[in-house]
Image: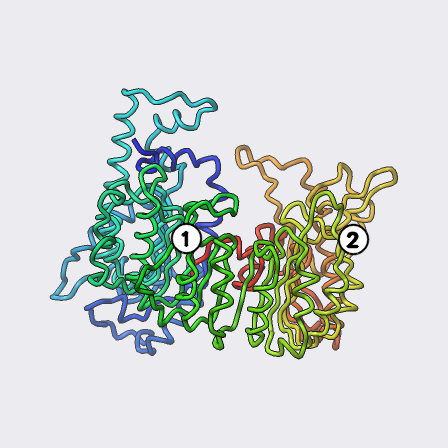
Amino acid sequence: MELDHDVLPMIAEMRYWEKRRRKYLGKDHTRRALLLDRVLGTRRIASRSQLLQIPSNLLTDIVDMLADDKPALASLALVNSCCRQLARSSQFAEVCFDYSPQSQELLQKLLKEVDPQAVNGQEAPTIGACIRKFTLASEPNWLAYYNEELSDAVTAEEPEPFTATDFRPLEIANEEYERVRDIILTTTTHAMPNLEVLAWNDSYAIDQETFRRIMRSPAQHVQFEEVHLSEIYSQNPVPLQIRNHVHLLPIWPLRSLAIRSLMGSYRLWEEEDVHAFHTALLRRCASTLESLVWHHVFGITDYKVQASAISFGDEPIAFPRLRSLSFQSATFTCSAFLSFLSSPLRHLTLPEACDLNELKQALDKCDTLYRLESIVIPNLSMFKNTEHIVRFLERHSHIKELGVDEGDTGYLNPFLIPLLSHERFANLRSLSLRWVWRRDEGPLQTPEEAFSTIGTLTFLEQLTLAAGAETPFTWVADHDKLRTTLCGLKKLRKFAVFGDAYKIGSRPGEAANITGFWNWCSVAPTESDKDAAAMPLIDAEVGDEDLDFVDKSDGSIDPHWKLNTVVEKAHRNRMVSQAEKYAAVLPSLEWIYLGQRPMAIREDPNEPGRRAAIPLTNRRDSYHTILKETFDRITWMEWREWIII
């Protein structure tokens, strides 16, 4: 039995789910309620309520303002059936099926809505009409809950090999999962008329019929995350007519497609079939595609290409509407890359790993992309030398946004920084750079010459400077020097420093900690006590630090809570002080990120002329959520993340 065709691997991921759930189930993007006539379907507005006489777009704005106020939405839903649908359009805008009992219950309600009963000749309002994004991301904990025997077997410290008698429980679990998945396919296709985004994140293999039914959903934005294709595809990939009938391919009218590891088992798929499948899939949606995220890892290990490149054959694929193209790893031929680069692109993220010779040829041969506005280079070290990428950037100096990650080489300072001049990149408004750090080099020092060059880009409106590894942070940032070099950026509105580490401080005889402020000293340093109490007005506005030191099992408080609170408050106040010094020399600054603390810059109402820094959270932004949301696609951490545009 193939491991990608049963629930065992999904249950086995239980230990790692918390990290994955942050990726799948992180903070929602801004939700928009639907217009009333769309969620009512064929039903007419019978109520004469004055509220419902307001234009639909204004009603939607009102509901959007209540999106985070659950009691208010619940009260609105009780007014009448129309208001219930308005409330639901916010409450159910995004639905994630995680295999929990609550998800199962909602799924059964949606199944009943597939053929809704008519009332007075009109269809009754449905929950399905309110759903705009549906995510399938089964939690291992809930899979284990419904399959306790299997869970005990695969999560044991030393799992025993399966015997013939073990397979019956596994078959039952698989049959139940496929039954539930069948309901999901039915409801997404027939019960969600306003579905816009479908995110398919379960690794359970999908066969031909499943893929057909996914294509029939009304969603125009589709994401596949670590999805495996059934072995049946390798024998007869009928749905896409890969082999002989390319000209007969029906269109899949997607606007955006995000693929990460949509592939078959290495044991069952030939490389030729994998390439043919992906080629046919792209050909099917090419005419309508506006955004493509491509992370195809077949034949790529440790950023080294082990397989041949994908070719589109004798008939190139045209992408007439493609505006945003983001590669992570991509094994394409030069001609295939040129098909992408012939599109009217606005945004381009180059691959982290690919057949380098093919990409270099494509970058040299492609026409200048005059509509291009942003470029991201997530792994500069991949290019071995910078000749090709420098030429490409010189031809596209009209861009407005640039992001470069140095990778594991020192190419950024000697090759790319000299390119950045006021005369050459006169349109550049957003810049994000990350320097490399090696563990044997000790704490990373500020690259002063590079910052001096950046300080001449007086037209910049947002800037991210990152250095070192994500953890442990090793950049000992000298903010006094940094302010001096950047003080000419009078138009800068948003500024982020990432990877910065700070001394916590120490008592006599204790070593100072410069590897990261999250590594607590055994005794709170005296200077931390003083700094923690220095800003009572901030304490009053932001509140106590949210450190999660309560033991959920018995409600007890971690004995180090008080110590850690002092250290965190001291660090917060120090970052506030640094932020206000930046605000004093950068007159347009509105938002700043230092030491994992996002802060707004506002006029101090009690002191005219003074600009104060206000922390936006009561804890450090440890997972960089706010940073990524604020800086959108060019923040360097985002290059490592899985996103759908």
Q: Amino acid at mark 2?
A: Asp
**What residue is shown with label 2?**
531
The answer to whether residue 55 is above or below residue 617 is: below
What residue is shown with label 1?
309
The answer to whether residue 84 shows anywhere in this view is no
| Circle 2 crowding by C-alpha within 10 Å: few under 14, some 14–19, many from 20 | some
Q: Is residue 215 above or below residue 255?
A: above
Q: Residue furthest right?
A: 508
Q: Position of residue 168 (x, y in %)?
A: 25, 25
Report if residue 637 is visible in the image.
yes
- In this rendered view, identify the residue nearer to me: 386 or 185: 386
State the residue at coordinates (53%, 61%): 629
Residue 519 horizontal/vertical position (percent): 70, 42
Residue 282 lies, with reference to residue 588, above or below; the image says above
- Mark with earlier residue (2, 1): 1
| Residue 126 spot, x, y in % from top left | 24, 59
Which residue is at 42% across, 46% downward?
307
Q: Between marks 2 and 1, how big is the CA–CA gap? A: 57 Å
- Whether residue 131 sits left or right of residue 522 in the image: it is left
- Type of amino acid under label 1: Ala
On the image, which quarter does residue 463 sit in? bottom right
Taking depth in this image into account, of 348 and 566 the one nearest to the observer is 348
Of residues 513 and 565, the one nearer the viewer is 513
Q: Is residue 48 above or below residue 136?
A: below
**In the depicted view, which residue is nearer to us: 311 or 564?**
311
